């Protein structure tokens, strides 16, 4: 245990024991989460952090009672100031609940990761066993497979049970499987243990289980499509219909005036448009992520480029958007004339300048990452197709009696898309006598497609362990083809979901703009507090941001990657700008000539 856990256990151990009595299942959750900490020590630390949160919450409530400006601003943007102490008082309870629930959440996360890795673990063990390796030894070799990080930790836990408690490997696997609440994992360990105890054909069992899991994955992909459809429909209800209702209520209250019924303050609208709506989009991005099957090691290069572009985005936001809402130093106003010129060139209504600035800011921020995402996806698809075709050709060439190395040499001059250049380099380094494991490490540094890497890793292990027997290579080629077919099926099922957010974003933009046009042309509805130019600034700027967020959700749902949503966000922002322009010329089109 660490120093903080020792301190909490010594000073607050009684409170930890009390929490343990209230939630006894946390012992199994900590074990399933592979958290190397005693349950009472962990709960004592949670209680200590709750005490710190209580002290911080009490201090903030005191600041609110004294009327300190940051707290008064928070009270102003909430529907009633009484919510401030209620929210602050609830923070310690939230910290306590989150701390108690964390082991279960981490265990669920590990289960989700294991679920995506299990079919490929079956695939790995099947290939190794077909090459003549002992099944338990093949299982332990997974500890060296960096492409299966969750399963590596779990196999390490199985080995630790066997070594620390003096269990035989089969009993250790049975005990480890009972703690993790994942059917596929239990089938892997318990089924293997049963086959060993009864003297069954372990290779046949593994092969049939692997084949069944890949068939089940095909069925699961269809279920994922249905679930994502439900997620998208729910998102449209919240993000489009809910936003539209709030926009209409705000426009009506500002146009009629605050003396008639209940009205919304600009601060409340700011909280809703710039904080609550993006938060809702973030929640649905998370829901879409957990509803999909994700690979263990995603390509993060695109997101690193995006993070590197964030300072540029913040700088552009400071000079193209903020000057239209608050007073800034003259040095930060140099971009205002350029934005105003763009507004005049596009023929947009006064007050749309910050919307244009925000659209330009977001576009320039994500263009580098969007370009990298396009190049990565195209390259990864070509490499995966080439690797799969190469493995099938390798199997057929191996049947002629050539060694695996000679087979690779004979196939090096064939065209396998973007994989061809890597294959030629592999063949060249094999001719120099370099080991396959070192060649694979260099290949893994250049290629980030997880499916391609796992296939090549299996090929390397099959050759090094079993000499590249025909049976093991045939097994590998069959499962590689199944993986490519599943990936194609997944893209085909998710692509139609892309149209739903586009329709929702266009509907939201058109309705808000028409609502503004209605109040512009209706006598007696002009706000006494805000001019139409100010209403355009308040309403259309968050509309651009919300269109971009809808594009992110569209990309995540349709492809499984948030980075795919960058281009959809740009398209929807352009559609919003075009909609604003069309709204400006529509009245003249329908006005009868004098």
Image (spheres, grey):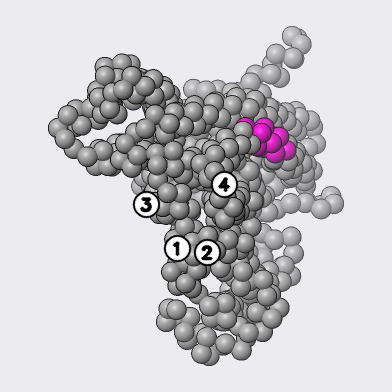
> Which residue is at the front of the view, 21 or 244?
21
Between discs 3 and 1, the one toward the N terminus: 3
| Quadrant containing the N terminus in the rendered view | bottom left
Answer whether labels 1 and 2 touch (C-beta < 8 Å).
yes
Dominant secondary structure of the residues highlighted in magenta in the image:
helix
Q: Which mark is residue 144?
A: 3
Quadrant hosting residue 84: bottom right
**586 above or below 557?**
above
Between discs 4 and 3, the one toward the N terminus: 3
Span colored in magenta: 217-230
Q: Nearer the viewer, mark 3 or mark 2?
A: 2
Residue at left 59%, top 26%? 489
Q: Nearer the viewer, mark 2 or mark 4?
A: 4
Q: Nearer the viewer, mark 1 or mark 4?
A: 4
Answer whether labels 4 and 3 touch (C-beta < 8 Å).
no
Q: Is residue 226 magenta?
A: yes
Q: Secondary structure at mark 3?
A: helix
Q: Is residue 224 magenta?
A: yes
- Mark 2 lies on residue: 172
Q: Secondary structure at mark 4?
A: loop
For this orientation, the residue located farthest to the right is 261
């Amino acid at each position: 245990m660490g120093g903080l856990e020792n301190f909490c256990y010594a000073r607050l151990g009684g409170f930890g024991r009390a929490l343990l009595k209230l939630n006894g299942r946390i012992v199994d959750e900590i074990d399933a989460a592979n958290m190397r900490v005693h349950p009472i020590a962990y709960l004592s630390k949670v209680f200590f952090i709750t005490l710190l949160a209580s002290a911080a919450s009490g201090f903030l409530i005191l600041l609110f009672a004294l009327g300190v400006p940051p707290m008064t601003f928070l009270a102003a943007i909430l529907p009633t100031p009484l919510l401030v102490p209620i929210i602050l008082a609830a923070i310690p309870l939230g910290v306590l609940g989150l701390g108690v629930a964390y082991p279960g959440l981490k265990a669920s996360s590990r289960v989700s990761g294991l679920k995506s890795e299990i079919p490929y673990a079956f695939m790995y063990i099947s290939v190794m066993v077909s090459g003549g390796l002992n099944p338990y030894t093949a299982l332990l070799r997974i500890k060296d497979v960096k492409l299966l990080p969750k399963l590596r930790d779990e196999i390490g836990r199985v080995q630790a049970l066997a070594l620390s408690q003096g269990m035989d490997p089969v009993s250790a696997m049975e005990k480890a499987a009972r703690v993790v609440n994942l059917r596929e994992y239990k089938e892997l360990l318990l089924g293997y243990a049963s086959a060993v105890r009864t003297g069954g054909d372990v290779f046949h069992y593994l092969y049939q289980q692997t084949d069944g899991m890949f068939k089940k994955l095909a069925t699961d992909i269809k279920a994922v499509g249905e679930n994502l459809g439900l997620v998208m429909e729910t998102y449209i209800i919240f993000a489009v219909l809910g936003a539209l209702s709030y926009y209409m209520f705000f426009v009506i209250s500002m146009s009629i005036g605050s003396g008639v019924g209940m009205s919304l303050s600009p601060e409340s609208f700011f909280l809703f448009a710039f904080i609550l709506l993006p938060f809702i989009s973030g929640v649905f991005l998370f829901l879409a992520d957990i509803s999909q099957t994700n690979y263990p090691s995603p390509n993060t290069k695109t997101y690193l480029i995006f993070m590197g572009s964030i300072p540029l985005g913040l700088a552009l936001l400071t000079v193209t958007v903020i000057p239209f809402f608050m007073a800034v130093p003259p040095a930060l106003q140099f971009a205002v004339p350029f934005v105003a010129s763009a507004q005049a060139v596009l023929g947009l209504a006064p007050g749309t300048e910050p919307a244009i600035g925000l659209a330009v800011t977001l576009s320039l921020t994500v263009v580098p990452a969007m370009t990298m995402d396009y190049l990565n996806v195209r390259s990864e698809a070509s490499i995966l197709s080439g690797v799969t075709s190469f493995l099938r050709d390798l199997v057929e060439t191996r049947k002629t009696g050539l060694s695996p190395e000679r087979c690779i040499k004979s196939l090096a001059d064939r065209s396998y898309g973007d994989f061809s250049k890597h294959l030629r380099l592999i063949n060249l380094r094999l001719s120099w006598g370099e080991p396959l494991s070192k060649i694979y490490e260099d290949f893994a540094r250049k290629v980030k497609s997880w499916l391609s890497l796992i296939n090549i890793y299996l090929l390397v292990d099959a050759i090094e362990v079993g000499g590249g027997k025909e049976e093991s290579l045939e097994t590998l080629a069959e499962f590689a083809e199944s993986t490519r077919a599943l990936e194609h099926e997944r893209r085909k099922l998710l692509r139609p979901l892309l149209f739903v957010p586009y329709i929702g974003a266009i509907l939201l933009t058109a309705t808000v703009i028409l609502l503004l046009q209605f109040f512009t042309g209706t006598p007696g509805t002009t706000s006494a507090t805000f001019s139409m130019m100010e209403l355009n600034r308040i309403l259309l700027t968050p509309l651009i941001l919300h269109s971009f967020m809808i594009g992110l959700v569209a990309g995540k749902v349709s492809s499984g990657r948030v980075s795919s949503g960058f281009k959809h966000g740009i398209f929807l922002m352009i559609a919003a700008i075009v909609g604003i322009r069309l709204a400006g010329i529509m009245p003249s089109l329908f006005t009868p000539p004098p």
